[in-house]
Amino acid sequence: MPEKKTLERAEQDKQEGKSPSTQAGEFVREEMEHIREGKHGARSTKQAIAIGLSKARRAGVKLAAPQRGTTSAKTRLSARRDSAAGRKGSRRKPNPNRSAASSRALQREGSAAASRPALARQARSAAAKRTRAARSQSARMGARHRAPSGRSRSRRSGGAGKRR
């Protein structure tokens, strides 16, 4: 179950009109904190991200399942199930034996998956799989959504900075 703070932050993102992936980012962030705190570990950064996305879908974030050809059929099916669980609310109580088993398995894993170098490696490898145009488009969108206070002084005036 996600923490109350995480649910509130995701809800705030939703109210601000931010994308589902941004809302889901709050759950991924929580997962990384759990690993750093030592609540449990993860085999890889990818696994830690997957756990966070699963929690987000189950909490009702309208995050689509990955497209065909990007991940395995098993992963897509799991994502669809998580989304369905998030839509209708949890009707069934989770099996305590199964929960305990998965918790024990995660506790046996290390915490290196949430380290800064591991996250940087993951981000670079994910970016490398995208086209140059896609990366450029998302950078432009980020700049557009960034508040003027987040930009440098010369850029705040809308391009009327130092010109030669």
Image (spheres, rainbow, N blue to C red):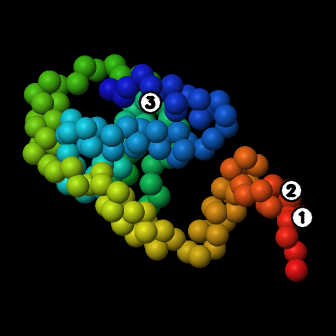
Relative placement, left or right, of 32 versus 62 is left
Residue at the image position 43 percent from the left and 63 percent from the top: 123
Q: CA distance from mark 2 to mark 1?
A: 6 Å
Residue type, label 2? Ser
Residue type, label 3? Thr
Q: Residue furthest bottom?
A: 164
Relative placement, left or right, of 147 versus 122 is right
Q: Residues within 10 Å of mark 1 (few under 14, many from 20)?
A: few
Residue at the image position 51 percent from the left and 25 percent from the top: 8
Residue type, label 1? Ala
Mark with earlier residue (2, 3): 3
Q: Nearer the viewer, mark 3 or mark 1?
A: 1
Is residue 125 or residue 69 the one in the foreground?
125
Which quadrant of the structure image shows residue 35? top left
To which residue does mark 1 refer? 160
Q: What mark, if any, has residue 6 been given in the picture?
A: 3
Q: Nearer the viewer, mark 2 or mark 3?
A: 2
Decide: marks 2, 1 in contact (CB < 8 A)? yes
Which quadrant of the structure image shows residue 118? bottom left
Q: Quadrant of the C terminus?
A: bottom right
Q: Residues within 10 Å of mark 2 (few under 14, many from 20)?
A: few
Residue at the image position 79 percent from the left and 60 percent from the top: 155
Q: Position of residue 147 (x, y in %)?
A: 72, 46
Q: Considering the numbered disc 2 on the image, is that residue within a helix, a strand or a loop?
A: loop
